[in-house]
Amino acid sequence: MQTFAMTLAGAPALSGHWQAVINPATGQAFAQVALGSPAHVDQAVAAARAAFPGWSALPDGERQRLLHALADLLDTHADTLMHLLTLESGKPLAGLGQVGSGMEVGGAVAWTRYTASQEIAHERIQEDADARVEVRRKPLGVVGSITPWNWPLMIAIWHIMPALRAGNTVVIKPAPTTPVATLHFVALASQLLPAGVLNCVTGDGEVGAAMARHPDIDKLVFTGSTPTGRLIMRDAANRLKRLTLELGGNDAGIVLADADPRRHAPALFAAALHNNGQTCACLKRLLLPDTLYEAFCAEFVRLAEQVVVGDGLDPASELGPLQNPAQRALVATLVDDARQQGARVLTGGHALARDGYFYAPTVIADARPGMRVVDEEQFGPVLPLIRYHSLDEAIALANAGDFGLGGSVWSDHPEHAATVASQLACGTAWVNTHGAVQPDAPFGGVKQSGLGVAFGAQGLDAYSSLQTLKVMKR
């Protein structure tokens, strides 16, 4: 069995306590990790605080060079990282629509390279005989990162790289069920970075709460559930800690009456079920017009019954297991609730009789608001289909609820779809795609889906404070 240590001040750190890491395809442990505590948070933050003056004082080009070196390191160790990701998360190496461990590692490389290339801009507001006024961007200090189990390495990179690029040091806590790829990457990175610049502490909610309350963490970045985000915001309030929160989503898609079912169904299906639906910005409820409803139902059933479900290490697998038994139990509960309320389960709707945490790809017809599978974020391989009678009704249904992460509109006439998409109450609206994020475009939620944005110039700015400098000339 593989063992993994934490990284504190650039060195491996053990605790005397171990936590097993389970392969969700088998239900059996494949690794154990050193189990951290709030005391380890204190050590990690002290190391990051000590490293901050030197790291923030580095010439900007040197920090860029080191981030490019981290991208090379990710690329060099891609096969190992893919293998670890599949073992701990269950996602296939390739996956439905090529969304799997390979895409996660490749995305981590691409995001790191893009972030390394970003410029830290200082703006000149005034330059005349009287005065010079500039706006400068200064690093914050120590950034804390708490990551989820669905995209453990990719989201770690989303948190770490802009923090380092802006001149901050980092303490990261991976999700307890998927810590190994992150621990492995941080251990590798410590061979390149000065000691204390990047630290990794393991642990449960007690460790996360210690980070949120810690007086020497200047900013906290969290990706995960809305209830946990509220707790973090509460704990961070005493220090007025800066926050970026990317929280839950219940993204809706609207299919317009001119959309061809054969053309759009495969992309819609992949947008809903890639990574087994375990993505915040997956399509989680689909609104279909009366005239196309049964045609789309038939297409989705055909697609669901063709999907290959299996161990992610099998190259043929398109969908793997759910990541943990609690998530599979939640998905089953939501599907059963819909069935009891009169929805038609067209295919799937049951756990698979095999080792691990597998659940059959599921298509639900006659779904409606009031069913938990519609109102809540199911985070599983389930596609609820909702019938609408008018476009105004569809927009209202899409905008209903507390979440506002993403939304999409599907049509054979993209410009018309774009006018509909602009009416969606969400942080990102897509046309004829869903969940497609990129490093140069800001991404974040509204309502209960989060606070602040990641990516692009706006996301990088969130890791700096603005200082206005005014120099009088006479």
Image: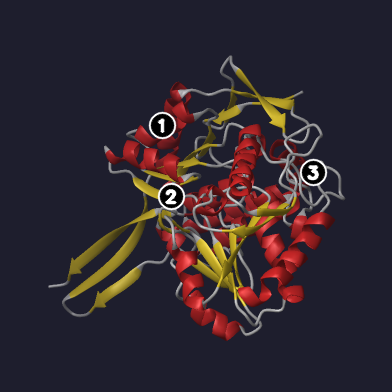
Looking at the rendered structure, the kind of residue marked 3 is Gly
Q: Secondary structure at mark 3?
A: loop
Q: Which residue is mark 3?
A: 312
Q: Mark on residue 245?
A: 2
Answer with mark 1 or mark 2, whichever residue precedes in sequence.
1
Determine the image quadrant of residue 5: top right
Q: Callout 2: few (<14), some (14-19), or many (20+) C-alpha neighbours within 10 Å?
A: many
Determine the image quadrant of residue 28: top right
Q: Which residue is mark 1?
A: 209
**In this picture, residue 152 sits left or right of residue 269:** left
Between 428 and 376, the residue placed more toward the observer is 376
Residue at figure coordinates x 60%, y 49% from the top left: 338
**In this picture, residue 223 sits left or right of residue 16:** left
State the CA–CA distance, disc 1 to disc 2: 15 Å
The relative height of residue 462 versus residue 397 in the rendered view (above or below) is above
Residue situated furthest left in the rendering: 474
Which image quarter is the N terminus in?
Answer: top right
For the residues carrying marks 3 and 1, which lies nearer the camera in this image? 3
**In this picture, residue 280 sits left or right of residue 328:** left
The relative height of residue 435 versus residue 160 in the rendered view (above or below) is below
Looking at the rendered structure, the kind of residue marked 2 is Leu
Q: Position of residue 301 (x, y in %)?
A: 77, 60
Residue situated furthest top in the rendering: 16
The relative height of residue 18 versus residue 79 in the rendered view (above or below) is above
